[in-house]
Amino acid sequence: MKNIWIICRKELRSYFVSPVAYVLFVMFALLFGWFFWNILGAFVFYSMASQMRGEMMPMNINEQIIRQLLSDLNVTALFVIPLITMRLFAEEKRNGTMELLATSPIRDIEVILGKWLAAVTLYIGMLLLTGLNYAFIFKYGNPDWKPLAVGYLGMLLQAAGLLAIGTFISSLTKNQIIAGAATFGACLLIFVLGWASGYETSTWAQVLSYMSVTTHMESFAKGVLDSKDAVYYVTVIFLGLFLTARSLESLRWRS
């Protein structure tokens, strides 16, 4: 655990000694803030319009604001995650320090977990930043906090899985641009696999739908904690880290 923590701190420090973390935080905050104020503005507009017409349409903050925000946050992660993971191993290879890391007494799994945990920690910080917007809702509204908590748990599990995949892809190349582009392509593919089930009911379409991360996010977005969805995300995390371990193992053999 000590070595994992050392690697994790080293990676987090490298994020913040460069503009990477600051650019990501600012970009993430601006995008989410834009989504928040537009969705909130639409909610207030339709609420006032229905009252002026004498209609008492039910307005649900959790369904009409929070659930939509989680959906937008889900899409935003698709662009942010490749930027977080593209440097994890690719930069080590580019700087020529990967060989030293591969031949060091630190085990591969400790290096992998340390770098992956640093990426997850950075993403958690970005999620916490969005809490400033929700504070406004809780101050002037009365939403149920439990669906929000479950939704954020789903977002974290999904991001952890995609970050594990990005970590594996970063271990395959020394070019950060290629690592970022390949991670974006892989994440996008996993996002859209479920589209086939919208017009096809055969077995292959259902299998692809189950493999999509968005399919398993639906329950979390509704505030429902389903064990099969949590197991799916844990499986994606394990698969991503396992493939990364095999990638580093092959590098150690060549060193």
Image (tube, rainbow, N blue to C red):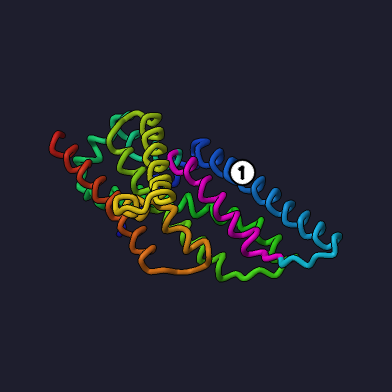
Q: At which x and y percent is residue 80?
A: 49, 42
Closer to the camera, 11 or 168? 168
Q: Is there any visible trace of residue 3 in the rendered image? A: no
| Residue at the image point whose x is 80% and y is 60% from the top | 50
Quadrant where the N terminus is found in the figure: bottom left
173 lies above or below 244: above
The local crowd at label 1, few if under 14, some if 14 to 19, many if 20 or more residues have their Cα within 10 Å, is: some
Query: What is the magenta range?
Result: 59-82
Closer to the camera, 149 or 208? 208
Q: At which x and y percent is residue 169?
A: 32, 39
Most common secondary structure along the magenta stretch = helix
Name the residue carrying label 1.
Answer: 31
Q: At which x and y percent is residue 22?
A: 56, 41
Closer to the camera, 55 or 91? 55
Q: Which of the 4 quarters of the picture holds residue 101? A: top left
| Residue at the image point whose x is 83% and y is 63% from the top | 51
Amino acid type at circle 1 is: Leu
| Residue at the image point whose x is 50% and y is 37% from the top | 20
Q: At which x and y percent is residue 57?
A: 74, 65
Closer to the camera, 60 or 49? 49
Quadrant where the C terminus is found in the figure: top left
Residue 119 among those drawn in magenta: no
**Left/right of residue 122 with respect to residue 59 in the rendered view:** left
* Element class at badge 1: helix
**Left/right of residue 187 with respect to residue 35 in the rendered view:** left
Q: How many marks?
A: 1
